[in-house]
Amino acid sequence: MSIVSASSRPRPPGGTLLTSAACVTAFILFYLNPAQAAEPLKPEPIPHVLKLPATYPASWVYAHDLEFNALLDGRVAIVDVAAETRPYKGHIGAGMMAGFLSAKTRPELYSAETFMSRRTYGERIDVLTIIDKRTLLPIEEILLPPRRMQVVPQKNAFQMTPDERWAFVMNFTPATSVTLVDLVQRTVLGEIPTPGCNFIFPTGQRSFSSLCSDGALVTLSLDASGALAKSTRTEPFIDIDTDPMFIKNAPSGGVHYFPTFKGRIQPIDFRSETPVVGEAWDLVEGEDAKASWAPGGWQVIDADARGRLYILMHAGAKEGSHKGGGTEVWVFDPGARKRLRRIKLKTPALSVAVTKGTSPWVVMTNAAMDLDVYAADTGGWKRTVHVNMGAHPFVVHAP
């Protein structure tokens, strides 16, 4: 008995029904004929590893993921925020609340990180890991004293001198100090105490400043060997009780711009060995002041290549709201002390970064922990990048 009914059997051009055997034969001849088959796929070489360029395009950023739900496994992802497809380029490990830096003069990345010998317990090991920007593989490790500050990513907990010869690593035990590392010789040069003062702001060629608990700024100058040569201190200038100042800042042309909780900007010129504390000015005036607009978030400020400031703002500011994020980004010309535009955010955000190319992008870590991308010149939203590399990219570095 035929397994193909007369109504369902294929008919050849002449209209005659094909038998079951003829159907099978036709199928084999048509579909398995070598002349009809595609060329076989060429074997893929194993391993097949691509390399990134030694110098990244201006639209590439580093998304520093704390990975709050698994703090031992932090990482830094390389992301092209201008790409319509395949924005993710790779990532490096950044173990346990690491600090991160990218060199300009060498194709190297740096992670100041902490590990435990038994993963969650055992001997503590602090290292400065040197990573090849092209392969994202470790090149070398420099063993650090086990005192490195472990904190949600802070750009000023890990810094370099302007010539990128030395690196400064902030320590906290809770005594405060800075470990000095020679990145060329791959060795620790020493440790500089900074009692009562925190974070690192490189000044001159071989000096750095730290913000102190009394609202002053201390500057420590080093000799050619890395030993402390002299120390200077400003008068207190931060109104800690009434209007505290964010540690986060936007460096532009050697001047760093620090917002305060209530919406002022404090410029500090770090271009010479002795910093100059400038005159503070207001971000918020008129009706915006009545609506209590103020800076808020984690990385609340950044600057583009032209020196314009991008500040994450929120309305209805009150005690404690300075960490709650913002709904707008305000763009300022610091020279004219003038607001240029307001960027209304599609999704409230916690951090802001601005790429440094000729057509800059504003990159926001939004409340869902994705990256929202806006055109800096128009303020228009362009895309949301789902990095899919972790949970908490609190800080975006735009080199």
Image (tube, helix red, strand yellow):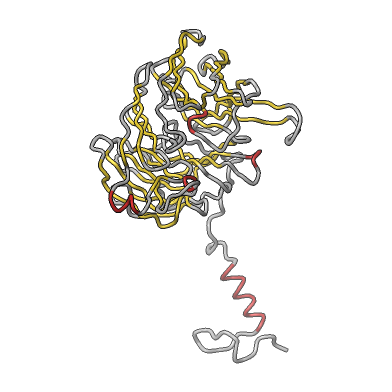
Residue 119: give x, y in percent of width and height: 73, 35
Residue 206 falls left or right of residue 181: left
Residue lying furthest bottom in this view?
7
Q: In this view, does 247 lie above or below 182?
A: below
Q: In which quarter of the image is residue 3?
A: bottom right
Residue 235 falls left or right of residue 286: right
Q: In which quarter of the image is residue 207?
A: top left
Q: Quadrant of residue 268?
A: top left
Q: How many labels does the image show?
A: 0
At a point 64% along the width and 40% down the height, the residue shown is 71
At a point 60% along the width and 21% down the height, the residue shown is 142
Seen from the viewer's position, the closer of residues 217 and 334 is 217
Q: Is residue 42 above or below residue 253?
A: below
Seen from the viewer's position, the closer of residues 267 and 166 is 267
Q: In this view, does 282 lie above or below 316?
A: above
Q: Quadrant of the N terminus?
A: bottom right
Residue lying furthest left in this view?
336
Residue 47: give x, y in percent of width and height: 60, 39
Residue 389: give x, y in percent of width and height: 57, 47
Residue 155: give x, y in percent of width and height: 48, 33
Seen from the viewer's position, the closer of residues 1 and 163 is 163
Seen from the viewer's position, the closer of residues 356 and 279 is 279
